[in-house]
Amino acid sequence: MSITAPETTTAPHGDDDSYNTGHSDGELAAITRLSSRRAHARAAMAEPYDPAYAAGYIDGFIQQTQANAAHRLRQLIAPSRKDHR
């Protein structure tokens, strides 16, 4: 029995596709309610290998978190508006 090192592949760094992939992954993380601490840890782990992905991940996470908060706020305010008519 022998142990071999895993093969590594090289991915292009800093391209738009990498940023967009990170952005989508960050949005999905926020939708699934991943904690901010874990999201930032994932981006920090990815940053040495693909800075564009890490930047996209954080941007997507923050953008979707803001959208989630705005949606929840509208849900909270909407019933109170109906009561005051």
Image: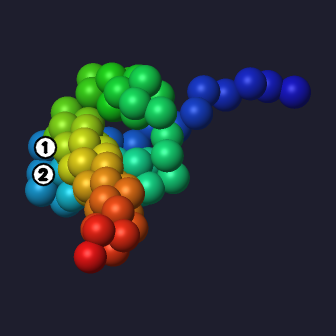
Q: Position of residue 60 (x, y in %)?
A: 25, 50
On screen, residue 33 above or below 16: above
- How crowded pointer 2 is (Cα within 10 Å; few <14, some 14-19, many 20+) is rated as few
The quadrant in which residue 50 appears is top left
Query: Which numbered circle lies on residue 70?
Result: none
State left or right for residue 6 relative to residue 58.
right
State left or right for residue 12 relative to residue 15.
right
The amino acid marked with disc number 2 is Asp
Q: Residue at x 38, y 57 (%)?
A: 76
Q: Position of residue 44 (x, y in %)?
A: 33, 23
State left or right for residue 57 relative to residue 29.
left
On screen, residue 70 above or below 37: below
Circle 1/circle 2 CB separation < 8 Å: yes
Q: Which quadrant of the rendered structure holds the C terminus?
A: bottom left
On screen, residue 79 above or below 25: below
Secondary structure of the residue carrying numbered label 2 = loop
Q: Residue at x 40, y 48 (%)?
A: 30
Q: Is residue 22 visible?
A: no
Q: How far apart, in angstroms, are the residues tagged by discs 1 and 2?
A: 4 Å
Q: Position of residue 23 (x, y in %)?
A: 26, 53
Q: Position of residue 7 (x, y in %)?
A: 52, 37
Q: Which quadrant of the rendered structure holds the N terminus?
A: top right
The amino acid marked with disc number 1 is Gly
Residue, far front: 85
Q: Is residue 2 visible?
A: yes
Figure label count = 2
Q: Which residue is mark 1?
A: 14
Query: Which numbered circle lies on residue 15?
Result: 2
- How crowded pointer 1 is (Cα within 10 Å; few <14, some 14-19, many 20+) is rated as some
Secondary structure of the residue carrying numbered label 1 = loop
